[in-house]
């Protein structure tokens, strides 16, 4: 993965092209703008070793590996590319989804389907071979297969109906971001969670829909979230419950109520073990200030005790 393995120091950007020519085993990618749609197709990837032709891909039962993390140089380069992609999105992307209000967000349906007229987005993450990806409790249409890989389905809905909940304590929850407009109730920050997926012969795939402004490619997956936080004292603009969208769904968070009985669970992805380049940070919508974190607000996504892997906390609310 790293040029330092061969005694070569990677200096970006002046020596980036040179390093790629010298080391044929390294993959080099750059952001691409789709010419017809104007949507940005993301090709950000960390610098890593590629799959060797003929090498067997061991999904389960392989040798246990010790997790290692990428150098600060690579972490910074990945972060720079992620932020450059987001900047392009903010300035160029136009909401094309069939939601005139402009607040499209993603929720997790109970089953692998969305109501008629509702956009469905489905993607597949190739997690660490022989790893410990798992799910427990209610995770809706987010599942882990027999090889430890995961399927993720989202339904794109109007985000303007999601507001504060009436509680005696804050309710913090996350919705997947699918547009460049935010409602009054969404906090002025965009949460980014980058998962460094399996390196060897990666099978990541976008099966249905448009994941923008998040992305998935052969190196990893980046998901963007809006956060909604309730107040300690109920106010006139707070809803008593989550909106009825006409189907059963869940959001991200660890809040205790209001939640349907038996409607909470976790899904863990075992991310790449070799030179892991996971990222988790927020960018303030107003100031562009970047804040690193070990978990996403409300703990909808958590890496506090396991930075090399990702835990999604899911709550069924309808």
Image (cartoon, rainbow, N blue to C red):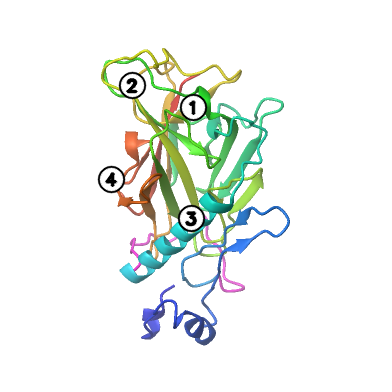
Dot 1 or dot 4: first in sequence order is 1
Q: Which residue is mark 1?
A: 250
Q: Any magenta on residue 57? A: yes
Give residue 87's mark: 3
Dot 2 or dot 3: first in sequence order is 3
Residue 49 image point, x, y percent:
49, 73
Give the overall secondary structure of the magenta segment: loop
Give residue 304's mark: 4
> Which sits in the foreground, 197 or 64?
197
Residue 183 image point, x, y percent:
47, 31
Give residue 256's mark: 2
Instruction: Tell me the CA gap for discs 1 and 2.
Output: 13 Å
Question: How dense is the environment of label 2, judged by Cα within 10 Å: few (below 14), some, or many (20 and up)?
Answer: few
Front disc: 3 or 4: 3
Q: Secondary structure at mark 4?
A: loop
Report the quarter where the N terminus lies. Answer: bottom left
Instruction: Tell me the CA gap for discs 4 and 2.
Output: 20 Å
């Amino acid at each position: 993965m790293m040029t330092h393995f061969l005694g070569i120091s990677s200096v970006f950007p002046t020596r980036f092209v040179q390093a790629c020519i010298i080391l044929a085993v390294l993959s080099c990618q750059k952001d691409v703008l789709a010419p017809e749609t104007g949507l940005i197709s993301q090709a950000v990837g960390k610098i890593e070793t590629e799959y060797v032709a003929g090498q067997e891909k061991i999904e389960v039962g392989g040798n246990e590996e010790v997790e290692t993390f990428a150098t600060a140089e690579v972490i910074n380069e990945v972060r720079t590319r992620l932020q450059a992609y987001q900047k392009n999105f903010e300035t160029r992307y136009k909401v094309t989804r069939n939601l005139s209000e402009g607040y499209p967000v993603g929720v997790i349906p109970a089953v692998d389907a969305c109501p008629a007229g509702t956009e469905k987005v489905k993607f597949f993450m190739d997690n660490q071979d022989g790893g410990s990806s798992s799910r427990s409790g209610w995770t809706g249409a987010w599942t882990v297969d027999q090889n430890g890989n995961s399927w993720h389905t989202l339904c794109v809905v109007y985000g303007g109906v999601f507001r504060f909940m009436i509680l005696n304590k804050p309710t913090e929850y996350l919705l997947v971001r699918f547009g460049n407009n935010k409602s009054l109730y969404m906090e002025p920050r965009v949460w980014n969670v980058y998962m460094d997926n399996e390196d060897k012969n990666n099978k990541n795939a976008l099966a249905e829909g448009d994941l923008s402004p998040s992305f998935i490619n052969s190196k990893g997956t980046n998901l963007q979230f809006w956060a909604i936080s309730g107040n300690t004292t109920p106010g006139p603009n707070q809803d008593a419950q989550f909106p009825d969208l006409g189907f059963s769904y869940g959001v991200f968070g660890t809040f205790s109520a209001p939640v349907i009985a038996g409607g909470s669970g976790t899904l863990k992805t075992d991310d790449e073990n070799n030179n892991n380049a996971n990222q988790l940070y927020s960018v303030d919508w107003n100031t562009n200030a970047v804040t690193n974190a070990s978990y996403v607000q409300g703990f909808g996504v958590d890496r506090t005790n396991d930075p090399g892997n990702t835990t999604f906390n899911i709550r069924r609310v309808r």
